[in-house]
Amino acid sequence: MSGAVLVAVAAAIGSFLQGWDNATIAGSLLYIKKEFNLETQPTLEGLIVAMSLIGAVLITTFSGAIADWIGRRPLLITSSVLYFVSGLVMLWSPNIYILLLARLLNGFGVGLAVTLVPIYISETAPPEIRGLLNTLPQFTGCVGMFLSYCMVFGMSLMSSPSWRMMLGVLSIPSVLYFILTIFYLPESPRWLVSKGRMLDAKRVLQRLRGKEDVSGEMALLVEGLGVGGETSVEEYIIGPANEFVEDQESSAQKDEIRLYGPEKGHSLVARPVTGQSVLGIASRQGSTFAHNVPLMDPVVALFGSVYEKLPDAGSMLFPHLGSMFSVAGNQTKNEEWDEENLAIEGDDYASEAAAEASDDNLQSPLISRQTTSLEKDMVPPPSHGSIFSITQGNDGEPAGSAGIGGGWQLAWKWTEREGDDGKEGSFKRIYLHEGGIQGIRRGSLVSLAGGDMPAGGEFIRAAALVSQPALYSKDLMDQHPVGPAMIHPSEASGRGPSWSDLFEPGVKHALIVGVGIQLLQQFSGINGVLYYTPQILEQAGVGILLSDIGISSASASLLISAITNFLKLPSIAVSMRLMDISGRRSLLLGTIPILIVALIFLVIGNLVTMGTVAKAAISTVCVVLYFCSFVMGFGPIPNILCSEIFPTRVRGICIAICAQVFWSGNIIVTCTLPVMLSSIGLAGVFGIYASVCVISWIFVFLKVPETKGMPLEVISEFFALGAKQVAAANN
């Protein structure tokens, strides 16, 4: 996974530049006010800071749609160029108006980086370490702020500090960012798949994962082309293929799914549960994850149920089948599939060579699956091609599977039923997740489709999300009346994103969570405190703490700001470690109360009469505590969540909407803070922020699910299922 890690580090340099800029504008504002006489013009003072935010809002309006159109990488390159140009213009700035223009250009660069870096990292990172890698922007941003504050503090000790030099230095690190985006960052593999560029996506995945066989993940990315769909929950029992009774009814065999291991000759069979069993499975269909908390979103309970069942380590079956459900995964190439692929090339569907003749971006096979006798009679037109390699098993079962990370298994099933007009078929995509209950020993009895499980061997329970595959089109059934009607990935991607997709229940449900968490994050006051930390600390009297060593009040506030950002680094390091262990939701619920306590003590410190030194000490400790707690949870997690919860086809547009809310809230907080400070004082400001944090904790508890370790495509399925349950409850 080193390839994915290095790419994430390179992309996170964009956040380093944002942190650098935040600190330099906060420090240089002390000197800009003096040169342009802004002490009596708080609105203009706020506008200097807010121009960057206005630029971010303007560019974000278009960035999502453009990112879905031309890709993530070109916009990251554009971001680096805008950082460089804005730094040069700020270095020049002969008057306040040129400075405002430079801040606007800077905002364009910041907006692109903040919007696209989380998307890019989420789309390139393995599920198991996606949270860690997506916390990197918070870490690099904090490093940028620390180094910038150190630089500004050093310049403040000069006889005549130059704010232009403070701001213009931004151009130097932006050159490094430009070089990395041009020569090192590949395009997002999910975006490439969404455009039908299968071979390019495969090469990028091979580089990111450091292995040749990426067929399972390629199949997952193809499944991510769909938006919405009817998703249901089923329960399966999984065990060795030879342990199931061979003379079961044919209907039971049709419902089972074959899961292939990385070694030839080893496979499992998954069969659906039809009724109540000793495992406590309530039913085959519908949600088994009911909750008793009033007003809690069903999505929260659905996600939570998976983590309650997640085993502590790997597969509980056999070592050679560890990749089936192991979080660590197994990178052994599936030789069984390869041999079968060679054996049947030229049979059934178009071969890989034939497919490449019609579309050189089509890589076949992506996955292996078995076929039915019905499918053998179907020959799809060359224009559609096939991403599947068909394998004829001994028992003719219509199934295939691939490990997709995070303990999830991707499988497909073609089932036939007798209908009024003859045989009717349906093609289903199934995401399987191990239930985590150790093997059912000999003598156990579990109700299965068509009969009972034999009293022998070891078996496990698995939850399953069942829905229609992205490439299965009901609209094409009339053209292909025999067998499943499959479309080419490029045909699916050709439809592109649509505004109507935003009203699909699962997407709309995810937007509520994304917009809500971003808005509450901003109204918790972080950017107001961040931009004006030097002035807040100066007003609190921190200069007294360092006056004995001859440091001015302005320099003292800058030094303490630098120390504060340095102390945030170990907090972020802890967050990076816990993000994929404790999870996003747990970190939010654990750190927001600390924000509330810190803000309450800031209110008390400004209302209660006390000595200057005591007041300065309380203010400093509370600001440090506030920042350190914020960067562990409420800082990085909203962007991480928003980059995870939307389908690939509309991810750019949806994140742009969330980013619009983010920047709009940022502007409101930043522009109103000077006025609020002069009207209701620090105590009133921090009291408002504390109230918002209380609301935020309630929102997180009721609405925000846990997404750690899940493939992005599975997360989208859960939101679709949650929206379906909400609609059913309302009806």
Image (cartoon, rainbow, N blue to C red):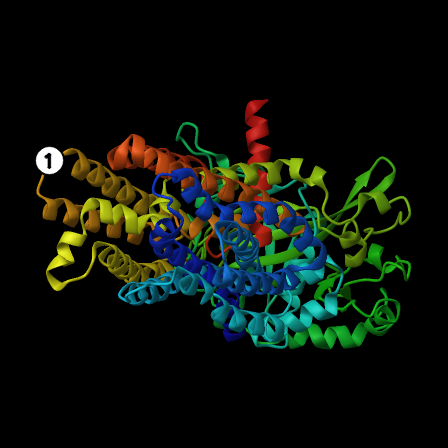
Residue at coordinates 84% horizontally, 43% vertically from top-left? Answer: 475
Q: Dot 1 corresponds to which residue? A: 609
Q: Nearer the viewer, residue 580 or 29?
A: 29
510 up-or-down from 121: above or below: above
Name the secondary structure under disc 1. loop
Q: Residues within 10 Å of mark 1 (few under 14, many from 20)?
A: few
Q: In x, y percent, where is residue 129?
A: 46, 63
Three-letter residue code for mark 1: Thr
The foreground one among 173 and 242 is: 173
**How many numbered badges does the structure rendering display?**
1
What residue occupies the far left of the structure in this picture? 611
Q: Residue at x 76, y 69 (%)?
A: 363
Q: Can you tell which quarter of the image residue 27 is in?
A: bottom left
**165 or 513: nearer the viewer:** 165
Residue 376 in the figure: left or right of residue 205: right
Taking depth in this image into account, of 690 and 344 the one nearest to the observer is 690
